[in-house]
Amino acid sequence: MVLVLLSIAGILYFALQLEDKFKIPSPLGLIGLSFVFHYFLHASPLFTSNPAEFSLLVLFLLPVLLISDSLELTVKDLKENGLSLFYLSVVAVSLSVLTAIFTADLIFADYQLSAAAVIVLFAMVLATDPVSVVSIFSKFSLPHRLKILAEGESLFNDATALIIFVFIGIYALDGGDITAIYVAEISVMVILGSAVLGILIGYLGLLVLKTTENRTAEIMVILCTGYGAFEISEHFYTLLNLFGGHSHLHLSGILSCIMATITVQHMMTKTLREETSRLGTDEEALQQEAQRNKPSRKLISGLLTRIKATIEERDRHIRTKEDIQLLAVIANTILFVAMVEIIDFKLLWQYKSEILAMFLATTIIRALMMGKFAIITNQTTKMTNVNFRWWGVLTFAGIKGGLSIVMLMMIPPTFEHLQMFQAVVIGVILLSTFIYSAILITIITKNKQTFRLEMEDEHHSQ
């Protein structure tokens, strides 16, 4: 266990050093250093030795990553960019899968994949990694709305991809009948059900949060809220069966976790605003009292006490978010180290042509969907206009992550193309992590000055 701790700390330290000194995004540094560590320093696995164990590890760590990223979203941002985020994370993903169904024969002509198999495969490689996107964006100054579009799309995209994968792809792969009515009903049921459940659990977490002023306890409440929403959604059928429902329905743990965390974040942000406003009022009252000929010591003492309490509470909320972000960074490090341990280079080389074909296909499809989104936004006042620079950022913000491997583990072991799917998914994750990240950084760096001017215009328009 000591070796595990030292390995995580060492890899994370050097990855952060590479990020700070050479502007290498932490996901790239973590993967590179994990390869060096695993293949040259410690060949035996630290966390997992096979994809099944890795998927369990991802399911254990995924909520804390979602919680950390969701704490950066506000209800105000969702209201202002809701239509855009809906298109990016729901419409674009759905259209991408439909496009894949009609073009898969060109990419995998030798495999004669069924429509169900195509849906399963493309849903896996369309799921993005919000951690990588947030990590890259944190090192640059970008317009707020562009960050919201990219980071929000990465979060909600995962929920949509997983819903399509489980309730349409796997359902059809197991022999289920896919009809337009079924797709519409299950989509509405799962999306609305997950969102409502997440909000309810978020408010429950808020009630518990009000019972403590201890920062560690506050962190535990937020984590339990997110994990609780995730777990209850994934095992929603158990809750239904307790009340005699006799159902096998489970909701989207990802979406419920996101909504629960956003609910908590909204109320925390609201409290912070009220505390900041109250702080300003108290400071003004303190200055006025101090300027009087005979100031009241009792009043001044009371104001100072309130100001101190307000500052302490505000700082506690801020530090709580920072601590959760630290947990997410550690969780992400563990995931990258574990992912390196399950990579089979012989298998990747065996299916190199399929991997490259899928990588190019998903890149082109994503570019087309983002291009269509840009055209739509420039024809309506209800969505943020997307220019060519933003199109480039949104296209290459589609870095893949560990959720795709979790989906791999849900495919029936008897599926005839399972080995090829495993190679393709892992290969696309690696290619997108390195290539997309490099292109994304190049676009942002090249347009640094323009983005700065856009930020100033955005600030002036508020």
Image (cartoon, grey):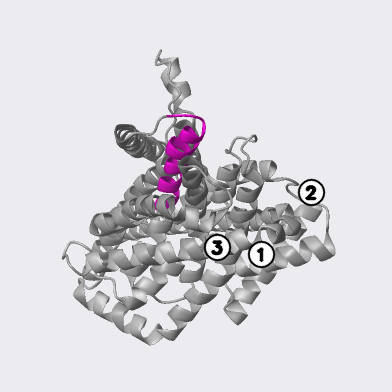
Which span of residues is magenta-colored?
156-176
Three-letter code, disc 2: Met
User: What secondary structure is the stretch in magenta mostly built from?
Assistant: helix
Q: Which of the numbered marks, if any, corresponds to residue 31?
A: 1
- First reached walking from the N terminus: tag 1 or tag 3: 1
Pick the residue in front: 324 or 387. 387
Q: Is disc 3 placed on a helix, strand or loop?
A: helix
Pick the residue in front: 426 or 210. 426
Q: Position of residue 232 (x, y in %)?
A: 46, 31
Name the residue that disc number 2 marks.
1
- First reached walking from the N terminus: tag 2 or tag 1: 2
- First reached walking from the N terminus: tag 3 or tag 2: 2
Q: Which of the numbered marks, if any, corresponds to residue 357?
A: 3
Q: Give the side of residue 143 with respect to residue 357, left or right.
A: left
Q: Give the side of residue 384 with respect to residue 403, left or right.
A: left
Pick the residue in front: 323 or 400. 400
